Amino acid sequence: MQINNKNKELLEKIKEDFEEITKNILFSIKDSKKQYFKLETNSRLVLYILYLLCGEDEENKRILDPIFNLPEECIREFLEYLILGGGSKWPDKRYSKKYNSTHFRYYSTSLNLIS
């Protein structure tokens, strides 16, 4: 299993969370020559669970319905990390600070995630 991102600190946080949940499964973060970092594990169990819960490949990623039944604070945190993983929250000088604070871009090849 591999998660790629330009934000190494984000991957470190995800690694800590995975290690807390899985205890004996090893995860590592490696530099890529393509200006991003890779969080990896060889655990088939982790891969299988993530496939079952979130979809098997990029085109089939999905968010589980129970996420939307969580308290608003938890949903906001989930969405913040979702955006960090596949979106863009960079301010656009053409718009006001207020607009930039409430709008973002999200990129995905999964129709499930963007609709």
Image: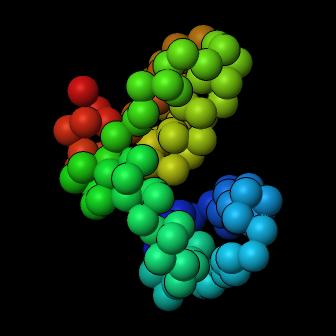
* Left or right: 41, with 1 as reference point: right
Q: Is residue 17 above or below residue 63?
A: below
Q: Is residue 88 above or below residue 76?
A: below
Which residue is pictured at 37% across the width and 53% down the height? 52
Residue nearer the viewer, 11 or 25:
25
Residue nearer the viewer, 26 or 80:
26
Residue 28 x, y percent position in the rendering: 67, 81
* Left or right: 60, with 90 as reference point: left
Quadrant of the rendering where the C terminus is positioned = top left
Q: Is residue 53 above or below residue 13?
A: above
Which residue is pictured at 53% across the width and 67% down the height? 46
Residue 41 x, y percent position in the rendering: 57, 79
Residue 12: quarter of image? bottom right
Colour approach in the figure: rainbow
Q: Can residue 26 be seen?
A: yes
Which residue is pictured at 47% across the width and 77% down the height? 44
* Left or right: 3, with 27 as reference point: left
Q: Can residue 9 be seen?
A: no
Which residue is pictured at 37% across the width and 58% down the height? 51
Count numbered badges in the picture.
0
Residue 106 x, y percent position in the rendering: 38, 38
